[in-house]
Image (cartoon, rainbow, N blue to C red):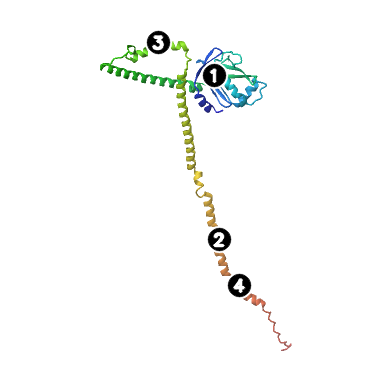
Protein backbone atom coordinates (compact mmCIF):
# COMPACT_ATOMS: atom_id res chain seq x y z
CA UNK A 1 0.00 0.00 0.00
CA UNK A 2 1.37 3.38 -0.91
CA UNK A 3 1.64 5.65 2.09
CA UNK A 4 0.87 8.85 0.13
CA UNK A 5 -2.48 7.52 -1.05
CA UNK A 6 -3.29 6.18 2.44
CA UNK A 7 -2.42 9.51 4.06
CA UNK A 8 -4.84 11.28 1.73
CA UNK A 9 -7.69 8.91 2.55
CA UNK A 10 -6.99 9.16 6.28
CA UNK A 11 -6.77 12.95 6.12
CA UNK A 12 -10.39 13.14 4.96
CA UNK A 13 -11.51 11.41 8.18
CA UNK A 14 -12.15 13.67 11.21
CA UNK A 15 -10.80 13.15 14.71
CA UNK A 16 -13.47 11.88 17.09
CA UNK A 17 -13.34 11.42 20.88
CA UNK A 18 -13.57 7.78 21.99
CA UNK A 19 -13.47 5.99 25.32
CA UNK A 20 -11.92 2.51 25.46
CA UNK A 21 -11.42 0.74 28.78
CA UNK A 22 -11.75 4.05 30.58
CA UNK A 23 -9.08 5.75 28.44
CA UNK A 24 -10.08 9.00 26.74
CA UNK A 25 -8.62 9.18 23.24
CA UNK A 26 -9.00 10.95 19.95
CA UNK A 27 -9.21 8.55 17.04
CA UNK A 28 -9.45 8.66 13.29
CA UNK A 29 -9.86 5.55 11.19
CA UNK A 30 -10.11 4.65 7.53
CA UNK A 31 -11.43 1.29 6.34
CA UNK A 32 -11.01 0.29 2.72
CA UNK A 33 -12.15 -2.87 0.96
CA UNK A 34 -9.56 -5.12 2.60
CA UNK A 35 -7.25 -2.61 4.31
CA UNK A 36 -7.38 -0.06 7.10
CA UNK A 37 -5.47 2.70 8.86
CA UNK A 38 -5.96 3.89 12.42
CA UNK A 39 -4.60 6.82 14.43
CA UNK A 40 -5.00 7.25 18.19
CA UNK A 41 -3.81 9.99 20.52
CA UNK A 42 -4.20 10.93 24.17
CA UNK A 43 -2.51 14.30 23.43
CA UNK A 44 0.67 12.96 24.99
CA UNK A 45 1.50 10.40 22.30
CA UNK A 46 0.18 9.43 18.89
CA UNK A 47 -0.04 5.82 17.69
CA UNK A 48 -0.82 4.39 14.30
CA UNK A 49 -1.34 1.12 12.47
CA UNK A 50 -1.61 0.41 8.75
CA UNK A 51 -2.61 -3.02 7.46
CA UNK A 52 -3.01 -4.37 3.94
CA UNK A 53 -4.74 -7.53 2.73
CA UNK A 54 -1.82 -9.89 3.25
CA UNK A 55 -1.06 -8.62 6.77
CA UNK A 56 -4.73 -8.90 7.77
CA UNK A 57 -4.87 -12.48 6.48
CA UNK A 58 -1.76 -13.48 8.44
CA UNK A 59 -2.93 -11.93 11.71
CA UNK A 60 -6.42 -13.39 11.37
CA UNK A 61 -4.93 -16.87 10.92
CA UNK A 62 -2.71 -16.33 13.94
CA UNK A 63 -5.55 -15.20 16.22
CA UNK A 64 -8.23 -17.55 14.84
CA UNK A 65 -6.76 -20.98 14.16
CA UNK A 66 -9.98 -22.39 12.77
CA UNK A 67 -10.52 -19.51 10.33
CA UNK A 68 -10.16 -20.56 6.69
CA UNK A 69 -12.10 -17.77 4.98
CA UNK A 70 -10.41 -15.18 2.73
CA UNK A 71 -10.02 -11.60 3.92
CA UNK A 72 -13.01 -10.17 2.08
CA UNK A 73 -15.26 -12.74 3.78
CA UNK A 74 -14.60 -11.57 7.36
CA UNK A 75 -13.24 -8.03 6.91
CA UNK A 76 -16.71 -6.52 6.53
CA UNK A 77 -17.71 -8.12 9.84
CA UNK A 78 -14.62 -6.69 11.53
CA UNK A 79 -15.46 -3.21 10.21
CA UNK A 80 -19.04 -3.47 11.43
CA UNK A 81 -18.02 -4.29 15.00
CA UNK A 82 -14.91 -2.08 15.24
CA UNK A 83 -16.07 1.08 13.48
CA UNK A 84 -18.83 2.07 15.96
CA UNK A 85 -16.37 2.04 18.85
CA UNK A 86 -13.54 3.74 16.96
CA UNK A 87 -15.93 6.41 15.65
CA UNK A 88 -17.29 7.25 19.11
CA UNK A 89 -20.79 5.92 18.41
CA UNK A 90 -20.64 3.43 21.30
CA UNK A 91 -18.53 3.15 24.43
CA UNK A 92 -15.88 0.48 23.95
CA UNK A 93 -15.84 -0.25 27.68
CA UNK A 94 -19.50 -1.29 27.91
CA UNK A 95 -19.79 -5.04 28.45
CA UNK A 96 -23.22 -6.08 27.25
CA UNK A 97 -23.86 -9.76 26.75
CA UNK A 98 -23.43 -10.63 23.09
CA UNK A 99 -21.99 -7.20 22.20
CA UNK A 100 -18.45 -6.85 20.80
CA UNK A 101 -15.87 -6.36 23.54
CA UNK A 102 -13.02 -3.85 23.27
CA UNK A 103 -10.05 -3.62 25.60
CA UNK A 104 -6.92 -1.47 25.58
CA UNK A 105 -3.50 -2.50 26.86
CA UNK A 106 -0.20 -0.62 26.97
CA UNK A 107 2.98 -2.48 26.04
CA UNK A 108 5.94 -0.20 26.54
CA UNK A 109 5.48 2.61 24.05
CA UNK A 110 2.85 0.70 22.04
CA UNK A 111 -0.85 0.15 22.65
CA UNK A 112 -2.98 -2.84 21.67
CA UNK A 113 -6.72 -2.81 21.11
CA UNK A 114 -8.28 -6.25 21.50
CA UNK A 115 -11.62 -6.99 19.89
CA UNK A 116 -13.78 -10.01 20.61
CA UNK A 117 -16.97 -10.74 18.67
CA UNK A 118 -18.86 -13.59 17.03
CA UNK A 119 -18.74 -14.48 13.36
CA UNK A 120 -21.30 -17.07 12.20
CA UNK A 121 -21.69 -18.27 15.79
CA UNK A 122 -17.94 -18.75 16.25
CA UNK A 123 -15.76 -16.43 18.39
CA UNK A 124 -13.76 -14.02 16.28
CA UNK A 125 -10.70 -12.26 17.70
CA UNK A 126 -8.80 -9.29 16.39
CA UNK A 127 -6.05 -7.03 17.71
CA UNK A 128 -4.95 -3.57 16.60
CA UNK A 129 -1.21 -3.23 17.26
CA UNK A 130 -0.54 0.51 17.28
CA UNK A 131 3.01 1.85 17.38
CA UNK A 132 4.26 5.44 17.84
CA UNK A 133 3.51 7.51 14.76
CA UNK A 134 6.30 9.41 12.98
CA UNK A 135 6.47 13.17 13.45
CA UNK A 136 5.67 13.87 9.79
CA UNK A 137 2.41 11.93 10.05
CA UNK A 138 1.43 13.73 13.28
CA UNK A 139 2.09 17.10 11.67
CA UNK A 140 0.10 16.32 8.53
CA UNK A 141 -2.85 14.70 10.32
CA UNK A 142 -3.10 16.82 13.47
CA UNK A 143 -0.80 19.80 13.90
CA UNK A 144 -1.16 21.60 10.56
CA UNK A 145 -4.96 21.15 10.31
CA UNK A 146 -5.45 22.39 13.89
CA UNK A 147 -3.26 25.43 13.29
CA UNK A 148 -5.22 26.25 10.16
CA UNK A 149 -8.49 25.76 12.04
CA UNK A 150 -7.29 28.17 14.75
CA UNK A 151 -6.44 30.76 12.12
CA UNK A 152 -9.85 30.40 10.48
CA UNK A 153 -11.67 30.64 13.80
CA UNK A 154 -9.67 33.74 14.68
CA UNK A 155 -10.68 35.34 11.40
CA UNK A 156 -14.28 34.36 12.02
CA UNK A 157 -14.18 36.02 15.46
CA UNK A 158 -12.80 39.20 13.90
CA UNK A 159 -15.53 39.27 11.27
CA UNK A 160 -18.24 38.70 13.89
CA UNK A 161 -16.80 41.48 16.07
CA UNK A 162 -16.87 43.90 13.14
CA UNK A 163 -20.46 42.86 12.37
CA UNK A 164 -21.52 43.50 15.98
CA UNK A 165 -19.92 46.94 15.89
CA UNK A 166 -21.89 47.82 12.75
CA UNK A 167 -25.09 46.51 14.34
CA UNK A 168 -24.51 48.72 17.40
CA UNK A 169 -24.06 51.71 15.11
CA UNK A 170 -27.30 50.84 13.31
CA UNK A 171 -29.24 50.48 16.58
CA UNK A 172 -27.86 53.76 17.88
CA UNK A 173 -29.09 55.48 14.73
CA UNK A 174 -32.58 54.07 15.36
CA UNK A 175 -32.51 55.43 18.92
CA UNK A 176 -31.35 58.83 17.76
CA UNK A 177 -34.36 58.96 15.45
CA UNK A 178 -36.83 58.15 18.23
CA UNK A 179 -37.14 54.37 17.89
CA UNK A 180 -37.83 52.46 21.12
CA UNK A 181 -37.88 48.76 21.99
CA UNK A 182 -41.22 47.12 22.55
CA UNK A 183 -39.69 44.87 25.25
CA UNK A 184 -36.96 45.99 27.60
CA UNK A 185 -35.47 42.51 27.89
CA UNK A 186 -34.25 42.87 24.30
CA UNK A 187 -31.97 45.71 25.36
CA UNK A 188 -28.25 44.85 24.84
CA UNK A 189 -25.05 46.57 25.84
CA UNK A 190 -22.64 48.01 23.33
CA UNK A 191 -20.08 45.47 22.14
CA UNK A 192 -16.58 46.26 23.37
CA UNK A 193 -14.13 43.91 21.70
CA UNK A 194 -11.32 44.38 24.21
CA UNK A 195 -13.46 43.75 27.27
CA UNK A 196 -15.11 40.77 25.58
CA UNK A 197 -11.70 39.19 24.86
CA UNK A 198 -10.57 39.67 28.45
CA UNK A 199 -13.73 38.08 29.84
CA UNK A 200 -13.40 35.20 27.41
CA UNK A 201 -9.84 34.42 28.49
CA UNK A 202 -10.52 34.71 32.21
CA UNK A 203 -13.93 33.02 32.41
CA UNK A 204 -14.77 30.89 29.39
CA UNK A 205 -11.40 29.26 28.71
CA UNK A 206 -11.00 27.74 32.23
CA UNK A 207 -14.54 26.37 32.14
CA UNK A 208 -14.07 24.66 28.79
CA UNK A 209 -10.68 23.17 29.68
CA UNK A 210 -11.93 21.87 33.04
CA UNK A 211 -15.05 20.27 31.58
CA UNK A 212 -13.60 18.56 28.49
CA UNK A 213 -9.98 18.06 29.47
CA UNK A 214 -8.81 19.32 26.09
CA UNK A 215 -10.19 16.28 24.19
CA UNK A 216 -13.40 17.88 22.99
CA UNK A 217 -13.84 17.58 19.24
CA UNK A 218 -17.54 18.14 18.68
CA UNK A 219 -19.46 17.90 15.42
CA UNK A 220 -18.86 21.54 14.45
CA UNK A 221 -15.10 21.20 14.90
CA UNK A 222 -15.16 17.91 13.01
CA UNK A 223 -16.98 19.64 10.17
CA UNK A 224 -14.41 22.45 10.13
CA UNK A 225 -11.56 19.92 10.23
CA UNK A 226 -13.05 18.01 7.29
CA UNK A 227 -13.45 21.23 5.30
CA UNK A 228 -9.84 22.24 5.94
CA UNK A 229 -8.36 18.84 5.10
CA UNK A 230 -10.57 18.32 2.04
CA UNK A 231 -9.41 21.65 0.62
CA UNK A 232 -5.79 20.72 1.33
CA UNK A 233 -6.26 17.29 -0.25
CA UNK A 234 -7.78 18.84 -3.38
CA UNK A 235 -4.85 21.22 -3.77
CA UNK A 236 -2.38 18.38 -3.20
CA UNK A 237 -4.03 16.23 -5.88
CA UNK A 238 -4.05 19.15 -8.34
CA UNK A 239 -0.38 19.84 -7.59
CA UNK A 240 0.53 16.17 -8.11
CA UNK A 241 -1.34 16.11 -11.43
CA UNK A 242 0.41 19.31 -12.55
CA UNK A 243 3.80 17.90 -11.57
CA UNK A 244 3.13 14.71 -13.54
CA UNK A 245 2.12 16.72 -16.62
CA UNK A 246 5.18 18.95 -16.23
CA UNK A 247 7.49 15.93 -15.99
CA UNK A 248 5.98 14.44 -19.16
CA UNK A 249 6.46 17.75 -21.01
CA UNK A 250 10.08 17.90 -19.82
CA UNK A 251 10.68 14.37 -21.11
CA UNK A 252 9.21 15.30 -24.50
CA UNK A 253 11.35 18.44 -24.68
CA UNK A 254 14.45 16.42 -23.75
CA UNK A 255 13.75 13.94 -26.54
CA UNK A 256 13.37 16.80 -29.03
CA UNK A 257 16.72 18.27 -27.95
CA UNK A 258 18.50 14.89 -27.96
CA UNK A 259 21.32 14.98 -30.58
CA UNK A 260 20.90 11.27 -31.25
CA UNK A 261 17.25 11.92 -32.05
CA UNK A 262 18.24 14.77 -34.40
CA UNK A 263 20.95 12.69 -36.09
CA UNK A 264 18.43 10.01 -36.99
CA UNK A 265 16.70 12.45 -39.37
CA UNK A 266 20.00 13.45 -41.10
CA UNK A 267 22.64 11.49 -42.98
CA UNK A 268 24.76 9.41 -40.61
CA UNK A 269 28.52 10.06 -40.68
CA UNK A 270 29.14 6.54 -41.91
CA UNK A 271 27.11 7.20 -45.03
CA UNK A 272 29.29 10.22 -45.87
CA UNK A 273 32.36 8.00 -45.68
CA UNK A 274 30.67 5.34 -47.78
CA UNK A 275 29.63 7.98 -50.28
CA UNK A 276 33.23 9.19 -50.57
CA UNK A 277 34.43 5.65 -50.98
CA UNK A 278 31.84 5.16 -53.70
CA UNK A 279 33.14 8.20 -55.56
CA UNK A 280 36.65 6.84 -55.31
CA UNK A 281 35.47 3.49 -56.65
CA UNK A 282 33.70 5.20 -59.53
CA UNK A 283 36.84 7.23 -60.30
CA UNK A 284 38.91 4.08 -60.34
CA UNK A 285 36.37 2.43 -62.58
CA UNK A 286 36.48 5.38 -64.97
CA UNK A 287 40.26 5.27 -65.01
CA UNK A 288 40.14 1.54 -65.59
CA UNK A 289 37.72 2.06 -68.44
CA UNK A 290 40.02 4.61 -70.06
CA UNK A 291 42.91 2.20 -69.68
CA UNK A 292 40.86 -0.53 -71.32
CA UNK A 293 40.01 1.76 -74.21
CA UNK A 294 43.67 2.73 -74.59
CA UNK A 295 44.68 -0.91 -74.68
CA UNK A 296 42.08 -1.61 -77.33
CA UNK A 297 43.45 1.21 -79.48
CA UNK A 298 46.93 -0.22 -79.25
CA UNK A 299 45.88 -3.74 -80.22
CA UNK A 300 45.48 -3.09 -84.02
CA UNK A 301 49.12 -2.03 -84.36
CA UNK A 302 50.24 -5.10 -82.54
CA UNK A 303 48.03 -7.23 -84.75
CA UNK A 304 49.34 -5.46 -87.88
CA UNK A 305 52.83 -6.21 -86.74
CA UNK A 306 52.07 -9.80 -85.95
CA UNK A 307 50.13 -10.58 -89.15
CA UNK A 308 53.08 -10.28 -91.64
CA UNK A 309 55.20 -12.35 -89.38
CA UNK A 310 52.54 -14.98 -89.23
CA UNK A 311 52.17 -14.88 -93.04
CA UNK A 312 55.88 -15.25 -93.52
CA UNK A 313 55.86 -18.15 -91.17
CA UNK A 314 53.11 -19.86 -93.18
CA UNK A 315 55.06 -19.69 -96.50
CA UNK A 316 57.00 -22.86 -97.51
CA UNK A 317 60.71 -22.64 -97.15
CA UNK A 318 62.61 -21.89 -100.44
CA UNK A 319 64.53 -24.79 -101.90
CA UNK A 320 68.25 -24.17 -102.22
CA UNK A 321 69.60 -23.93 -105.78
CA UNK A 322 71.76 -26.76 -106.92
CA UNK A 323 75.18 -25.63 -107.92
CA UNK A 324 76.77 -27.03 -111.06
CA UNK A 325 79.45 -29.43 -110.34
CA UNK A 326 82.77 -28.24 -111.29
CA UNK A 327 85.52 -30.49 -112.34
CA UNK A 328 88.69 -30.81 -110.71
CA UNK A 329 90.19 -28.71 -113.14
CA UNK A 330 87.29 -26.45 -114.20
| Marks 3 and 2 in Cβ contact (< 8 Å) | no
Q: Secondary structure at mark 2?
A: helix
| Marks 4 and 2 in Cβ contact (< 8 Å) | no
Picture layout, residue 26 above or below residue 231: above
Between 75 and 298, the one lying in front of the other is: 75
Between 274 and 246, the one lying in front of the other is: 246
Q: Residue at x 30, y 19 (%)?
A: 170
Percent position (x, y) of residue 107? 58, 15
Residue 303: mark: 4
Q: Earlier in the sequence, mark 3 or mark 4?
A: 3
Percent position (x, y) of residue 10? 52, 24
Of badges 4 and 2, nearer the viewer stands 2
Of badges 3 and 4, nearer the viewer stands 3
Q: Residue at x 41, y 20 (%)?
A: 153
Q: How many marks?
A: 4
Res. 188 in view = no
Res. 303 in view = yes
Measure the C-alpha gap from mark 4 to mark 2.
27 Å
Q: Earlier in the sequence, mark 2 or mark 1?
A: 1
Quick one: quadrant of the C terminus?
Answer: bottom right
Measure the C-alpha gap from mark 2 to mark 1.
94 Å
Residue 203: mark: 3
Q: Where is mark 1, residue-wise?
A: 86
Question: How crowded is the residue under tag 1: few (<14 C-alpha within 10 Å), some, or many (20+)?
Answer: many
Q: Secondary structure at mark 1?
A: helix
Q: Earlier in the sequence, mark 4 or mark 2?
A: 2
Measure the C-alpha gap from mark 3 to mark 2.
112 Å
* Outermost residue toward the bottom in this view: 330
Q: Earlier in the sequence, mark 1 or mark 3?
A: 1
Q: Is residue 191 left or right of residue 70?
A: left
Amino acid sequence: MERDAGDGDLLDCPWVPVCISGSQLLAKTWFGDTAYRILLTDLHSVWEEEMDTRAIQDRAQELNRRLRAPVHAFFSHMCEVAHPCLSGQVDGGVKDRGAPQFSLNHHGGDINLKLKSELAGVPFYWEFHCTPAPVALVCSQLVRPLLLMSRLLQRQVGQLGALLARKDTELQDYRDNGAVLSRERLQTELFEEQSYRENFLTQTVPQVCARQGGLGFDSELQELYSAVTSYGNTNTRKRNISERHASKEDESATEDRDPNHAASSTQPPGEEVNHGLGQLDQGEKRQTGQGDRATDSERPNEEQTKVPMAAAADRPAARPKKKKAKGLFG
